[in-house]
Amino acid sequence: MPQDDFAIASSRRAVFDANVVAFRTLLLKEIRRFLRIWPQTLIPPAISMALYFAIFGAIIGRRIGEMAGFDYMEFIVPGLIMMSVITNAYANVSASFFSAKFQKSIEALMVSPTPNSVMLAGFVAGGVARGLAVAAIVTVMAAFFVEIRIHNWFVTLGMLLLTAIVFSLAGFLNGLFADKFDDISIIPAFVLTPLTYLGGVFYALELLPDFWRTLSYFNPIVYVVSSFRYGFFGYSGDVPVAASFLAVALFAAVFWALSLWFLNRGIGLRT
Amino acid sequence: MTEPKALAIRGLKKIYAGGFEALKGIDLTVEQGDFFALLGPNGAGKSTTIGIICSLVIKSAGAVEIFGIDIDRDFAAAKRLIGVVPQEFNFSIFERVGDIVETQAGFYGLRHGLAARQTEKYLRKLGLWDKRNEQARHLSGGMKRRLMIARALVHEPRLLILDEPTAGVDIEIRRSMWSFLREMNEAGTTIILTTHYLEEAESLCRNIAIIDHGEIVENTTMRALLQQLTTETLVLDLAEPLLEVPELAPYGVRRIEPTCLEVDIAREQDLNEVFQRLDAAGIRVRSMRNKSNRLEQLFVALTQSEGSAETLVHAAG
């Protein structure tokens, strides 16, 4: 075996290559994890989305008729896809990272030369992978009920990716500060779910009275869902798509910087 | 130019958030190729020291160098040279054995082909190759320990740190692990071992440091430390029962049972004379053993008092 394989990676190039391998390894480990427990990770979103489509779309939707000029069933599809991406990207990273902390398997990564930025990127990429996998499943399910049309691929895929990144990072922060399993279910239950349900998934904001409509503009999920819906239909209500992109990207940058700052100081991980 | 130490620690301090001072400025060096024992009672600072060396714990002050690389300057490069076997099982029990080891290789930057070959090499060496496709939760306690050793070695570290690697494993596996570690050491890997089995340290290690209350209370060679014992107590099993204690002055003799005697022997005295005197008294000895592990006597004395080696050796006798 060539001894060089184990020599200290002294050149920048060698360190970079080693970090790429470490990132890929962590990403594959994360993908293996959510595929191993597919009945917990991939099936539940498929079932709940099928129920949403059946109840809100096929059964109640017929009575509702149109929403903002679109068939109601068609209207809720982008929001439901986004809702599963948000929930699953967040849950994947918060659960995986906290479990690794809880059973101390994170130490195997911490004692290795993998930099904090690569560790963070690996966990986030794992969350994004699950978010996208679930998005694909939900989209396929939706295709049984409505015809999927894409108005703008760039906006659709861009917002999908950015949202998965932002909520994976948020899940990471949750996992970093969690001390017990309860701590990773509090934010999804008390913050994410209400914000998502009130984020325009099931209704157009113009249906709301002025006060509630204004209040809704403080809900970041409104921008995510509306912009994603724009990607499908070219309609986003009065939410500006470009500004939404900027805001979501800004959130991603802030969450990334915060996570890395905490990691570099050992907060939540090292004693 | 002198070769750098495998490990050089200077003035290492750790004060935890609550104000507890776990390390009070310790100095410690381990030469390349050494088999070094770091001993101490629970809570003495061993795991904190190891935690700092491998970046699980943030030091409060002091310097640590691994083969001349200062961890404050390039911790990543230093970490490439270290393999750690922690005290507690710290892998996901739901992952497959082969994946656990190969993933660790990836964290050290080993590409897939090389990582797979290294995984096979160490799983075979540690007798786990047949278990590579099983989830780790199905392994026995001894196998889990060996899995952690395989994982620590997969990137060919030059310094292997084992924190109580044989805790809870049966004697047969413990002995096979000792022989494996001796081979690793003879092949050039520097090994630092913490253990509560003092016969393990005595049998394997050439140099030793004893840490207590965050301070190094002894740091010497195993041979020099054991020579500090001035008196040893031997237990003799006799062929026939004795009614009274035989006169063996200047040796201290006690009758424990009719067929069992304890004899205290000072370092400058020799065993031949004891046996001549016993023979003359018509006492036949069937077997003989040390009353307690020699290192254990020293360890207890060193960590139970403020004391120095002088007080301990007499206490030990």
Image (tube, coloured by chain):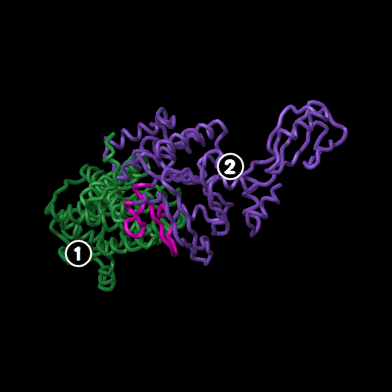
Give me the chain that's purple. B
Helix, strand or loop at disc 1?
Answer: helix
Q: Residue at x 23, y 60 (%)?
A: A224
Q: Residue at x 16, y 47 (%)?
A: A148
Q: Can the viewer see residue A27?
A: no
- Residue identified by numbered label 2: B197
Give the image location of residue B218, x and y in percent.
56, 54
Give me the chain that's green. A
Give the image location of residue B16, x and y in percent.
49, 63
Residue B79: within the magenta? yes
Camera-side residue of B107 and A104: B107
Camera-side residue of A78 and A206: A78
Q: In this rendering, is residue B176 above or below A259?
A: above
Helix, strand or loop at disc 2?
Answer: loop
Quadrant into which the C terminus of chain A falls: bottom left
Q: Can the viewer see residue A172?
A: yes
> Chain under label 2?
B
Quadrant into which the N terminus of chain A falls: top left
Camera-side residue of A169 and A84: A169
Q: Residue at x 70, y 37 (%)?
A: B270
From the image, state whether disc 2 or disc 1 is nearer to you. Answer: 2
- Residue identified by numbered label 1: A244
Identified by mark 1, the residue type is: Ser
Give the image location of residue A62, x and y in percent.
24, 51
Residue B261: within the magenta? no
Q: CA distance from mark 2 to mark 1?
A: 63 Å
Q: Over which residues does the magenta segment extend?
A: B53-81
Residue B272 lies in quadrant = top right
State the residue lying farthest toward the bottom: A211
